[in-house]
Image (spheres, rainbow, N blue to C red):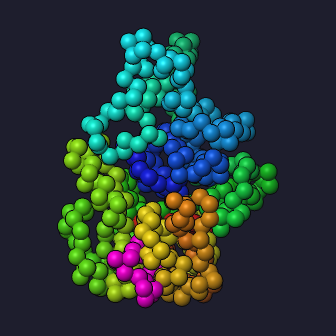
C-alpha cells in the first residue's frame, strides 16, 4: 500500500494510522525526521499509537539514525513492548571511502549514487532527499533482514510438524480484540503538549506500573485513506463541487458552505509533478476550507469506545476533541484556529478557555496545527436514530467568526477530526 504523504509531521497522522495504513497493517514506518529536529517525543507518541493498532505489535521501521530516537526504540525493546524494530539509515550505512572511488571501481549498488531516478528538473530533487540508489540500498537492507527471518522460519518448519497451527495461534494472539492492551510508562514528557492522554495514554487502573490508552477515533480528508473519511461524519454545511481538485475554486462557492479544496502550494506542487507522470505520488492534502460567510460546518462524532448506555452527560463518553488544519504556512493574516473559530459541542457553546493548542508534536514549520477542545459540562450526547435510541454520538459545529479571515489571506481549514472515547 502506498500510504506516504509528503511534508507532514508525525501527528495528526499518528492518530490516524488505521485510516491510512489499514486496520490489518503488519508494518508501520516513521520517517518524519525532516520536520521534527533531533528529539524522540514525537516518535514515542507515534510508537504508542502503533502498539494500539489491531495487529499489535507491528514490525516497526524507523527511517532515521538520530541517537535519541535509536535509544527510544531500544528502551521499548528492553521493556518487551516492541520486538525486532528496524532502523534504516541509507547513506549512513555507506563507507564514504567507497563513494570516493572512480565510478567503475565502486560496488554495483554504489554506482550512479548521485543520479536521480526522476527526470532532470522534476520536483523534490533537493540535497536532503535520497536519490535512486540510496532508496535501492534501503530496500535491499530491509529485504536482507526479511530473508534472514525467513531462513529462521524455514528451519523451524523443518523441525516442527505442528508449525502451521502454532503460527495461527500466535497471529490470533497478536490481533487485538476485546483484550486489554498495556503499554510501558512513557520515556519522554508530554505534559506540556496539552494532550497527554491522547499521546501517551494514562496509568492503568488495575496496575500502576503499566499504562493504557483509550480508543482514539480519527476522520480525515487527507488522501489516500483506506477508511474513516472526514465526509462520513459531516451532516451539513458544505458546498458540493465536482470540479477537479487541481482547479482553483471560485470565491462564490464559499458563500453558504465550507468547500473541499487544497492549498496553493499543494496545488502548484501537484501540477508540477503531473508534468512528469505523477512520479508515483497519489497523496493529496485536501481539506474543508471556510470563511465567515460559509456558515456552520455541522458534524456528528460516533462514540467508538466501550459499550455504554443511557442519556448521560457527554463527558462520560468523550474526553476531548482535536481539530487539525492542513499543514501549510500562508502568512501572518491567515486563519487562527484559536481566535477565529466559534465552536459548539453537544449543543453547548465552547468557551475560549476550553480550547488550547496542541504543543510540540503536531507542528509544521514551527506552526502548531491542532487545537484541543474540552467537552463542556452541559454537553449532551445524541443518537443516530433518535426513534430507536441507537448509535450514541456527539454533535460538533464549527463556524468562522474572525472578521479578517479571507481566502486571499488564508481561510480556516479542517483536515482531521480526532476524539478520545472513554
> On the rendered image, what quadrant is the C terminus found in?
bottom right
**What's the residue at 55%, 25% (across, down)?**
93
As for residue 18 lying within the magenta part, the answer is no
Residue 50 locus on image (x, y percent): 56, 47
Q: Nearer the viewer, residue 307 or 236?
A: 236
Please indicate, yes or no, whether residue 293 appears anywhere in the rendered image. Answer: yes
**What's the residue at 45%, 44% (across, down)?**
24
Residue at the right extreme, as displayed: 208
> On the rendered image, what quadrant is the N terminus found in?
top left
Residue 201 locus on image (x, y percent): 67, 58
Residue 305 locus on image (x, y percent): 56, 64
Q: Nearer the viewer, residue 374 or 317?
A: 374
| Residue segment shown in magenta | 395-414
**What's the residue at 78%, 53% (across, down)?**
207
- Give left or right: position of 54 versus 134: right
Residue 61 sits above or below residue 137 on the image: below
- Give left or right: position of 78 versus 53: right
**What's the residue at 62%, 39% (across, down)?**
66
Residue 351 sits above or below residue 373 on the image: below
Amino acid at each position: 500500500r502506498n500510504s506516504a504523504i509528503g511534508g507532514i509531521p508525525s501527528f495528526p497522522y499518528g492518530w490516524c494510522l488505521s485510516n491510512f495504513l489499514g486496520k490489518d497493517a503488519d508494518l508501520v514506518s516513521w520517517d518524519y525526521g525532516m520536520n521534527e529536529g533531533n528529539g524522540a517525543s514525537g516518535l514515542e507518541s507515534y510508537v504508542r499509537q502503533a502498539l494500539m493498532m489491531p495487529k499489535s505489535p507491528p514490525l516497526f521501521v524507523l527511517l532515521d539514525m538520530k541517537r535519541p530516537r535509536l535509544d527510544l526504540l531500544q528502551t521499548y525493546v528492553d521493556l518487551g513492548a516492541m520486538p525486532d524494530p528496524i532502523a534504516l539509515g541509507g547513506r549512513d550505512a555507506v563507507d564514504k571511502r567507497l563513494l570516493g572511488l572512480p565510478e567503475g571501481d565502486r560496488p554495483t549498488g554504489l554506482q550512479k549514487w548521485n543520479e536521480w531516478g526522476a527526470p532532470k528538473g522534476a520536483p523534490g530533487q533537493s540535497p536532503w532527499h535520497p536519490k535512486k540508489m540510496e532508496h535501492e540500498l534501503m530496500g535491499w537492507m530491509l529485504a536482507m533482514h526479511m530473508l534472514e527471518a525467513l531462513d529462521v522460519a524455514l528451519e523451524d518448519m523443518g523441525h516442527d510438524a505442528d508449525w502451521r497451527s502454532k503460527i495461527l495461534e500466535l497471529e490470533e494472539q497478536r490481533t487485538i480484540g476485546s483484550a486489554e492492551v498495556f503499554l510501558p510508562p512513557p520515556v519522554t514528557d508530554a505534559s506540556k503538549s496539552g494532550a497527554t492522554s491522547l499521546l501517551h495514554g494514562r496509568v492503568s487502573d488495575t496496575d500502576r506500573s503499566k499504562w493504557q490508552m483509550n480508543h482514539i477515533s480519527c476522520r480525515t480528508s487527507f488522501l489516500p485513506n483506506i477508511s474513516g473519511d472526514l465526509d462520513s461524519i459531516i451532516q451539513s454545511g458544505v458546498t458540493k463541487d465536482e470540479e477537479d481538485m487541481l482547479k482553483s475554486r471560485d470565491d462564490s462557492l464559499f458563500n453558504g458552505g465550507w468547500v473541499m479544496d487544497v492549498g496553493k502550494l499543494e496545488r502548484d506542487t501537484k501540477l508540477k509533478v503531473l508534468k512528469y507522470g505523477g512520479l508515483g505520488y497519489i497523496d493529496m492534502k485536501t481539506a474543508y476550507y471556510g470563511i465567515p460567510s460559509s456558515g456552520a460546518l455541522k458534524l456528528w462524532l460516533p462514540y467508538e469506545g466501550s459499550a455504554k448506555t443511557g442519556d448521560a452527560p457527554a463527558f462520560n463518553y468523550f474526553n476531548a476533541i482535536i481539530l487539525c488544519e492542513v499543514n501549510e504556512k500562508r502568512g501572518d493574516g491567515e486563519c487562527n484556529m484559536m481566535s477565529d473559530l466559534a465552536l459548539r459541542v453537544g449543543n453547548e457553546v465552547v468557551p475560549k478557555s476550553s480550547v488550547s493548542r496542541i504543543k510540540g508534536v503536531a507542528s509544521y514549520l514551527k506552526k502548531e496545527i491542532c487545537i484541543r477542545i474540552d467537552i463542556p459540562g452541559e454537553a449532551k450526547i445524541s443518537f443516530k436514530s433518535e426513534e430507536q435510541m441507537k448509535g450514541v454520538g456527539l454533535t460538533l459545529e464549527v463556524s468562522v467568526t474572525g472578521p479578517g479571515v479571507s481566502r486571499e489571506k488564508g481561510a480556516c481549514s479542517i483536515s482531521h477530526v480526532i476524539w478520545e472515547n472513554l
